[in-house]
Amino acid sequence: MGSTLSQQQQQQQPTTKTTSILITNTYGPAALDEAEGIDRYRQLCQTNKSNSIARTRQSYFFNSLSLADKDLLLERITAYQSHIPELLIKELTKAIVIPLMPSADAGMPHTRPPHYICLPTSGKPLELETYVHELWHLHQRAFYAKWKQLYRVWKFTVFTGTLPNHLATQVRINPDTLADPLWLWKGEWVPLCVFTDPVRPTFKETEVWFYNINTGVHRKTPPPDMTAFFSSRLPPSAYEHPNEISAYLLTTKRMEAYPAYIVLESFFGKGVSIRN
């Protein structure tokens, strides 16, 4: 994919091992087609009633940026290379950024297989934490078996049971969690990102709920022992899935004292922090 850049853009690429390439107009749609052929994310959304309705006014297409906007984005990505965690520099060999239309997935950056960061572009600068967050999602894709080992240490197991229909039909599909969408924590709680209005679902009205498989009821805030282990400072959306919990833990400042971070750092080593 590196050949899709102009000669000038190639000269601007970072020299670190984690190479981020801003994809060009010619190959953008083909890259999205490649990703769709692997994960069927858009097809899943279109065939799911709630997710289809919630995405009605979204335009999920490649965004052909102006040369000036392309250069600004590449310049920002290049400037971030010296801050990328050492583990990502060592192990993540490719990250390709695909600009999307501003409304795609309600403007939320996400990843697609095998190594794409899909970035809805609305004029808001790409922040370092957001960029590294997405790089961790790519690392999760590349080393998923190892991440699943960590999640088991965190007391997560893949949920293979059945959700009540009124919850199952409200779950928002997340491209970063498609491999195993639902997980069970401590044999009791299943986190779910749900559309709170089942009649008119929108991305503006979603919450993470916690379904108790033993009692059949759900709560709208994390169990106290969950926040004690992971962090009371994580945003509510982080709790939807261990992929999101870990990505937020690794991009939020001053998480080192929480048990989950200590376990994660012990598991992967010291090179997981964003470098100053």
Image (tube, grey):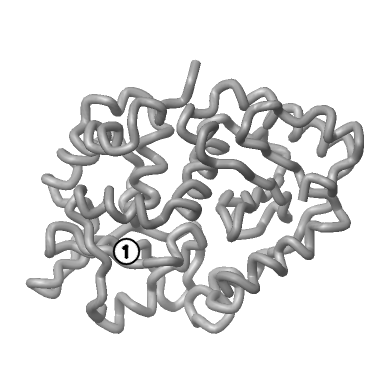
Residue 15 vs 184, above or below: the answer is above
Disc 1 residue type? Leu
Q: Residue at x 76, y 58 (%)?
A: 62
Residue 59 location (% of width, % of height)? 71, 64
Image vertical order of residue 185 relative to residue 94, above or below:
below
> Disc 1 marks which residue?
192
Vertical order, 184 against 18 (above or below): below
Residue 248's spot in the image, x, y percent? 39, 40
Residue at horizontal 47 percent and vertical 43 percent from the top: 136
Label 1 CA crowd tier, 10 Å (few <14, some 14–19, many 20+): many
- The x, y position of residue 178, in whole percent, is 45, 66
Residue in the image at 48% along x and 20% along y: 275
Q: Looking at the image, which residue is at 38% across and 79% down?
A: 169
Circle 1 SS class: strand
141 sits left or right of 27 in the view: left
Q: Is residue 170 left or right of residue 59?
A: left
Which residue lies most toward the left here?
Answer: 215
Give how far across and how far down residue 22 sits, in percent.
75, 43
**Is residue 104 toward the left or the right of residue 158 in the image?**
right
